[in-house]
Image (tube, rainbow, N blue to C red):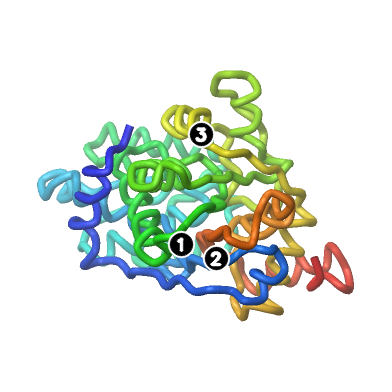
Amino acid sequence: MVSLADIQKAVENVERLTIRSPQRPSPTLSARLGANVELKLEMEQHSGSFKTRGAFHQMLALGEAALGEGVVAVSGGNFARAVAYCSGALGVDAIVCMPENAPQGSIAATRDYGAKVELLPDAVAAFARADEWVAQGRSALHPFDSAEQVAGNGIVGLEILEDCPGLTDIIVSIGGGGLIAGIISAIKAVKPEARIWGVEPELAATMQRSLEAGELVNIRPASLTKTLGAPFVSQTAFDLCRKHLEDLILVSDQELIRAQQFFIAHEGIAPELAAASTLAAAEKIKSRLSPDNQLVLLICGCNDSPEDIASYAAKIGEGSDHL
């Protein structure tokens, strides 16, 4: 498990390299949800998502000798972008193995940041290729199942508490579980009474299935939001969620799209579907909120392309900007 001391070490390690992302109140959503709502805009982090904090921390933890041999990662989305951005900032040679069906925007951005991209037929082949690079001396970076990645993610939780000391509730999206593991580790260490809510797509309910089974399970994700499409969650995230989650909310892809469109129309931001999931979940728990609650929606990334956003909106037709 990651301790508060581990997260504070991550702060010292990466604060010069990362952005303290803004957090602001939302009067519109406060009125809509019947609680005091703030948005943590981690979508404004370098590379467009929270992944950058942990990627920096993982690399710096390796030491100069290992970094000199280069790094390798597997990702079809935000972690690929983050590794590429961080390797460029640190002058590290990076290879990212990506499945051929990864979003073209993520492939292009990863290359633009300076990483070498190898396209493989699918995720299984990408992981196998990465293993070959590790055998040749490169260090592997993991998108969510890494203590350093979790500690880096935990920085977001500490910032939220500093900006909202009266926090009572926070909603966090779950993919592989690295983000919520970091948030739980940070917030429960400082404010154990705060309620932490998780959210997953109905078509990628990896954590939900695992909690129901009482053990880790593998699934075949089918949601439109690929950044919440991990086929399994980490043991650390599973253990923390089983102990600390107030509840786990499932949302449909249609609800994700409507939430994304609401943010665009009413908040002036364009979060990716994964990030918009926190609003979709908030709609489902608003009867469990009260006017004195301080609720933070963690907006974790913004890497859906304009073309993706338009295609999502087309799926629900006219009126898609209304939840």
The residue lying toward the viewer, choosing from 142 and 293, is 293
Labels 1 & 2 near each other (Cβ < 8 A): yes
Residue at numbered disc 1: 49
Residue at numbered disc 3: 241
| Dot label at residue 316 | none
Query: Residue 143 sits in which quadrant?
Result: top left
Amino acid beneath label 1:
Ser
Q: Position of residue 51 (x, y in %)?
A: 41, 55
- 267 relative to 320 in the view: left or right: left
Labels 2 & 3 near each other (Cβ < 8 A): no
Of circles 2 and 3, the one toward us is 3
Spatial CA distance of label 1 from label 3 is: 22 Å
- Mark 2 is surrounded, within 10 Å at the Cα level, by few (under 14), some (14 to 19) or many (20 or more) other residues, namely many
**On the rendered image, what quadrant is the N terminus found in?**
top left
Residue occupying the point 87% across, 73% down: 319
- Mark 1 is surrounded, within 10 Å at the Cα level, by few (under 14), some (14 to 19) or many (20 or more) other residues, namely many
| Dot label at residue 303 | 2
Amino acid beneath label 2:
Asn
Q: Secondary structure at mark 3?
A: helix
